[in-house]
Amino acid sequence: MIDYTSNVRPAEMARITTPELAASFIDEQVELIRRQVGDKKVLLALSGGVDSSVVAALLIKAIGRQLVCVHVNHGLMRKGESEQVIDVFGKALDANLIYIDATDRFLDLLAGVAEPEKKRKIIGGEFIKVFAEEASKLEGISFLAQGTIYPDILESDGVKAHHNVGGLPEDMDFELVEPVKLLFKDEVRVVGEALGLPHGMVYRQPFPGPGLGVRCLGAITRDRLHALREADAILREEFDRCGLAEKVWQYFIAVPDFKSVGVRDSKRYEGWPAIIRAVNTTDAMSATIEEIPYAVLHRITDRITHEVEGINRVLLDLTPKPIGTIEWE
């Protein structure tokens, strides 16, 4: 039997590519979760992404109402994201969901912080604090579930810090529950479908734990964050319209913290550039660039530069992974 407590994926572990292999993995995890948790309660950060959703489904299958799902709006979500999580999980799926709006708390801590790793650590650390505070209000919480997957562990070794890698502070009494930490992203999706999650949820756009915090490059300001959120929403709308949303694994906008000179209404107009990144991958360890039709790029550029205040240029990132990572920070 595979040792799922290890952070190293065994060479003999078969890739989960079929419903049968997924069902076997699910059965194993349900047994392991029940054995680990017993009659205690588990706290889960539910972002609505595939990783946390699959973990939630596994835990619900294993321990039912012992799971307490918490959605934290850190002010770095995509447009409409938190509202969608509430609609899908709190209403449609009837999960035991707690919603926390911590926008000001996170953005105040991040003010003036430009270094990417420091931003990630601040966001990750504050997440832990938010959960600790929430847990203190609840009775019987002994475990913290996380949607850590294997690329998170691999990339955290000298590349970048992830909010769901590295464990918990010593003064926190939570024990980690990480049922998919040895799986790659494509395997998590197969497991999600085997668990009966909606197709749109299983294939939802990947979104990093620090959210738009790693796409609002450099020190985050509220006006640039707002511009990023609006530009990213336009990109997603246009990808949906032309059929690229189902084809491209990950696509997003990044906005750096410098401006260039432009012209609007016959006047000098300084604004930020919006950088389009669209990549394809199966395991997130390497990635290729999606070739976006120029007609689509022209439409996206026209909309962003006319509809989003503060942006006056649209650029396209053509860098594969390696040498670049999928995210800019």
Image (tube, rainbow, N blue to C red):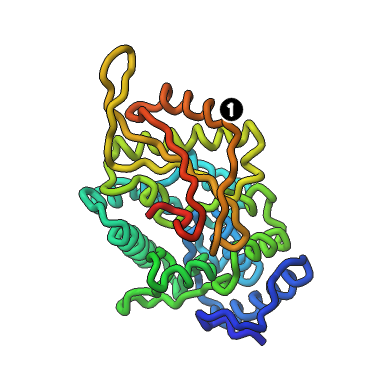
Tell me what residue is drawn at x 57 percent, y 79 percent. Answer: 9
Residue at the far right in the pictured view? 20
Vertical side of 104 occupied by 234: above or below: above
Vertical side of 8 occupied by 188: above or below: above
- Is residue 90 visible in the rendered image? The answer is no
Image coordinates for residue 317, horizontal then vertical, percent? 46, 44
Tell me what residue is drawn at x 26 percent, y 19 percent. Answer: 268
Q: Mark 1 highlights which residue?
A: 295
Image coordinates for residue 225, horizontal then vertical, percent? 34, 40
Question: Toward the viewer: 242 or 143?
Answer: 242
Image coordinates for residue 325, horizontal then vertical, percent? 45, 57
Q: In which quarter of the image is the C terminus?
A: bottom left
Vertical side of 23 occupied by 319: above or below: above
Name the secondary structure under disc 1: helix
Image coordinates for residue 84, horizontal then vertical, percent? 53, 43
Using residue 189 as the reference point, say whether residue 156 is left or right of it.
Answer: left
Residue at the far top in the pictured view? 266
Using residue 103 as the reference point, say whether residue 239 is left or right of it.
Answer: right
Q: How many marks?
A: 1
Tell me what residue is drawn at x 30 percent, y 35 percent. Answer: 223
Q: In which quarter of the image is the N terminus?
A: bottom right
- Is residue 19 visible in the rendered image? The answer is yes
Using residue 153 as the reference point, say whether residue 261 is left or right of it.
Answer: left
Question: Toward the viewer: 257 or 324?
Answer: 324
Three-letter code for the amino acid on which mark 1 is drawn: Ala
Which quadrant would residue 36 be assigned to in this image? bottom right
